[in-house]
Image: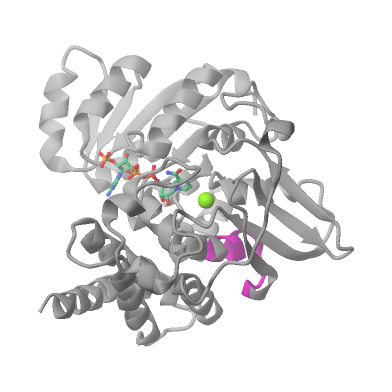
Amino acid sequence: MNTENIKLAILGSTGSVGKQSVEVALNLGARVELLMAHSNIDELERQARLLKPKICVITDENRANELRLRLNDTSINVYSGEKSAIEAICECDADVGVNAVSGFAGLYPALALAKSGKRIAMSNKEAIVVAYKFLLDEIRKGGSELIPVDSEHSAIFQCLQGRVGNNIKKIILTSSGGPFRGKTRNELLKITASDALSHPTWKMGAKITIDSASLMNKGFEVIEAVRLFGVSPDQVQVVVHPQSIMHSAVEYIDNSVIAQMGAPDMRTCIQYAITYPQRREPLAKALDFASIGALTFENPDMNTFSLLSLAFYAIEEDGILPSALNASDEVAVDAFLKGKIGFVDVFDIVSKVVYGFENIKNPSLEDIYNADREARIKTLEQINSFLK
Ligand code: NDP
Ligand code: MG
């Protein structure tokens, strides 16, 4: 791909990764053909005036008319609703779609990019966790490709360049350990949403910041790695590395370890997924090893941070359990952010729902959607019983 005249669609453009994708687009001098968000029309309008895409998609139909009015003086077409979003993504003239939509709602835009043969620069991890098999089918049929954006998976993807045959021993997935590294379960009982929203090294959206604090995010990333790189769950080792400089590594059968390092800055990962295999001028700072001093590594505390063990259980069982895990966590984290339940309640409620969930092996896409719905209902029931 010629990265000089690259054309982009940015899906979830008003979020944390989406805004950084806009910075990357400007850095690359890329033409942005389409911007998509859910309901934040203030930010979407600002981006639209800056980047002048042909299309803006707003998935919340209640906000569409206002956005249309606001963009009345431009030639930008405003689409709203899921069906029109799919049409717009398929028909727009982009080479690459950055999928920075949050949650399971990231699946249908990914499928639309795949069907229309566009490269997917994939930040959304929920679609991979829940329904990668179906996404991969569409990628193959549509002649598309998926390049990971999640920093660990971008690192692993880079560590796998030049690999010949199946000679991976294991994947070493690094975790900052989150803001509560070293804390006991008793200490976690007092944690509030604002404590959990301050991540030590990465600045991210609210849901993923809470998931990073609980290590649920690392659990999702274990599943994401199993899916993307075709390894078994026991070939993924999570290692806590508080400095977030080594973004992950691959250990080969000769015990050589290839790691990828850099400043913790999502813009590097977004840009690489867009320009791969080329590399372009950075937005992130270069590393200064002498000032970093030391890189440290330790095992995660999977007893206290039990959602990480739960993720290993869900991917070992597979079927609809990753879907149930994803949905249950989304509902429980939402309740925690609204102050309805405590931090540790999230661990307990999600564990109860997933361990008690009846699995279906080799599910259809419909089974997966049903599991998502059922897990949400079961989680709400659990939350309500906590509130009584
Ligand atoms: P944010 O919550 O900051 O942003 C989410 C974006 O998705 C917003 O643009 C939002 O629009 C849009 N959106 C939400 N719901 C829908 C929907 N139903 N249909 C269409 N668009 C929707 O999330 P992040 O940027 O933090 O994360 C995005 C994804 O990337 C997640 O899957 C996350 O796990 C993953 N990721 C994030 C990282 C990070 O550093 N933040 C790192 C690695 C992965 P609106 O603003 O209008 O609501
Ligand atoms: Mg990550």
Q: What residue is shown at x 57% (from left), y 39% (from top)?
A: 264
Q: Which residues are magenta?
A: 223-233
Residue 119 appears at what percent x and percent y?
55, 40
Residue 26 appears at what percent x and percent y?
48, 19
Asked if residue 217 lies left or right of residue 60, the reply is right
Asked if residue 75 lies left or right of residue 126, the reply is left
Q: What residue is shown at x 54% (from left), y 70% (from top)?
A: 301
| 244 or 105, nearer to the observer | 244
Asked if residue 53 lies left or right of residue 236, the reply is left
Q: What residue is shown at x 27% (from left), y 35% (from top)?
A: 57
Asked if residue 341 lies left or right of residue 324, the reply is left
| 144 or 334, nearer to the observer | 334
Give yes or no for residue 129 being in the magenta stretch: no
In the image, residue 383 above or below residue 246: below
Give yes or no for residue 230 being in the magenta stretch: yes
Q: Quadrant of residue 79?
A: top left
Secondary structure that dominates the magenta span: helix
Looking at the rendered image, the quarter that the C terminus falls into is: bottom left
Residue 375 appears at what percent x and percent y?
29, 75
Residue 212 appears at what percent x and percent y?
44, 56
Q: What residue is shown at x 27% (from left), y 55% (from top)?
A: 193
Q: Quadrant of residue 91?
A: top left
Q: Quadrant of residue 168?
A: bottom right
Looking at the rendered image, the quarter that the N terminus falls into is: top right
